[in-house]
Image (cartoon, helix red, strand yellow):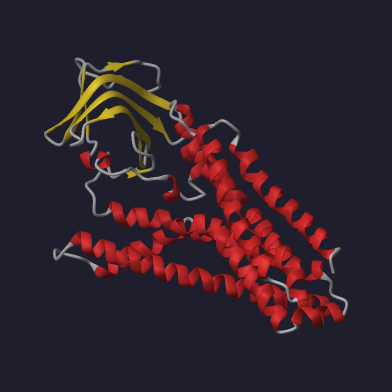
């Protein structure tokens, strides 16, 4: 009973402190975003409430890259506070060694990761839907699910892919265009190639288009021309980026992207990072606790603050490096995403083992 009470006490403290840090970051990010959007909108019509809704729903996607550092800092702060209030010494006196203190920290990191991946991450899709209400309808009300120059529109009947080699500065003319139409089961219906396309009377008109006839649908090119209700606004801004696709939508988008020959590695890497995030945050929490537990007990923290800063740099370097490798397809994204928690977990074990021998 005492062991369980200790576990939940530390777990609760860790969770609350981490959420407090995240709320503070969220407030700062939201204020900055609101100020920037207000400046860009100027004195024209500006729906404050709708804008705040979008900003709040978008914030989790912006915070994803900050989560490892939030867990690193909040874990270190909690262990430091427990040490200064002599809680760690009391735990040791009643026979609760370091592993009993660090275990709830690991669970806390995992829980934060699960909450983010499966509850907060999908909010970005809701924000995107709100933004789409202010844009012209695209292909019977479709919504954007692709990236710049690999544009994907999703509607009730399936996917519209538009792969473009070159777009002029005004987004009025395209060169090297491929249009693909897929159904909801990711079966190819139509594939059309054209050397160029341009907007005419509100439609995207393909010139010298060729229907390759490799799909299941009826031919859609007539006399070398194809007209689509494809909005120009899609090309004037970066089409929906990977951080605004929810973890529940990503597998379908990846499958469709791979089927039409577009690069799926950026999306696949993001998906693997999302589902591996709980393990990563748990491993970082363990490493942060291992770094600071014994120095706090000895009352010697000066050098270990530097160690925490060095760990933050190592996290940044490894996350950036593996993201680049996974996004390019040089290494399978799953290996990189799940390899990081292993690396940080093993580092935590080594640090804890070395520092426990110095007591």
Give residue 45's quadrant in the image: bottom left
Residue 341 location, x and y as percent?
Answer: 67, 50
Residue displayed at 57% across by 30% down: 330
101 vs 313, nearest the viewer: 313
Could you tell me residue 263's position as x and y percent? 46, 31
- Tell me: residue 178, above or below residue 63: above
Q: Is residue 245 left or right of residue 221?
A: right
Please tell me which residue lies in front, 351 or 260: 351
Q: Quadrant of the C terminus?
A: bottom right
Say left or right for 354 vs 333. right
- Residue farthest to the left, as pictured: 201
**Whole-percent x, y for residue 49 in the image:** 28, 70
Residue 51 visible at all: yes
Across and down, in percent, residue 79 comes to 69, 73
Q: Residue at x 38, y 25 (%)?
A: 189
From the viewer's perspective, is residue 78 above or below residue 160?
below
In the rendered image, which quarter contains the N terminus? Answer: bottom right
Instruction: Please tell me whether residue 111 is drawn above or below residue 150 in the rendered image.
Output: below
Q: Is residue 218 visible?
A: no
Image label count:
0
The front one of 139 and 6 is 6
In the picture shown, does residue 66 fall above or below 264?
below
Q: Quadrant of residue 55?
A: bottom left
Q: Residue at x 60, y 33 (%)?
A: 331
Q: Which quadrant holds residue 150?
A: top left
Q: Residue at x 27, y 22 (%)?
A: 220
């Amino acid at each position: 009973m005492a062991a369980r009470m200790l576990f939940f006490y530390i777990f609760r403290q860790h969770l609350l402190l981490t959420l407090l840090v995240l709320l503070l970051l969220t407030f700062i990010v939201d204020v900055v975003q609101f100020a920037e959007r207000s400046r860009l909108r100027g004195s024209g019509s500006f729906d404050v409430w709708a804008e705040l809704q979008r900003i709040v729903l978008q914030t989790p996607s912006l915070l994803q890259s900050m989560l490892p550092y939030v867990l690193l800092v909040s874990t270190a702060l909690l262990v430091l506070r427990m040490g200064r209030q002599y809680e760690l010494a009391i735990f040791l006196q009643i026979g609760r060694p370091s592993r009993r203190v660090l275990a709830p920290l690991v669970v806390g990191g995992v829980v934060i990761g699960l909450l983010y991946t499966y509850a907060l991450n999908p909010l970005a899709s809701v924000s995107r839907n709100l933004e789409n209400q202010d844009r012209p309808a695209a292909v019977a009300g479709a919504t954007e699910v692709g990236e710049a120059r690999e544009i994907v529109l999703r509607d009730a009947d399936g996917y519209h892919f538009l792969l473009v080699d070159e777009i002029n500065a005004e987004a009025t003319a395209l060169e090297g265009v491929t249009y693909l139409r897929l159904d909801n089961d990711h079966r190819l219906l139509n594939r059309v190639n054209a050397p160029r396309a341009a907007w005419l009377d509100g439609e995207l008109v393909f010139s010298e288009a060729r229907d390759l006839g490799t799909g299941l649908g009826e031919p859609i090119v007539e006399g070398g021309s194809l007209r689509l209700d494809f909005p120009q606004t899609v090309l004037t801004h970066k089409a929906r980026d990977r951080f605004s696709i929810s973890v529940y939508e990503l597998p379908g988008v990846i499958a469709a992207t791979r089927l039409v020959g577009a690069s799926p590695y950026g999306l696949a890497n993001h998906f693997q990072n999302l589902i591996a995030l709980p393990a990563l945050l748990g491993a970082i929490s363990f490493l942060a606790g291992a770094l600071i537990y014994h120095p706090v007990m000895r009352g010697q923290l000066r050098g270990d603050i530097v160690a925490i800063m060095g760990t933050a740099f190592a996290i940044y370097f490894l996350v950036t490096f593996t993201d680049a490798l996974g996004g390019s397809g040089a290494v399978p994204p799953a290996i990189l995403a799940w390899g990081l928690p292993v690396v940080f977990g093993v580092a935590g074990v080594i640090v804890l083992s070395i520092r426990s021998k110095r007591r």
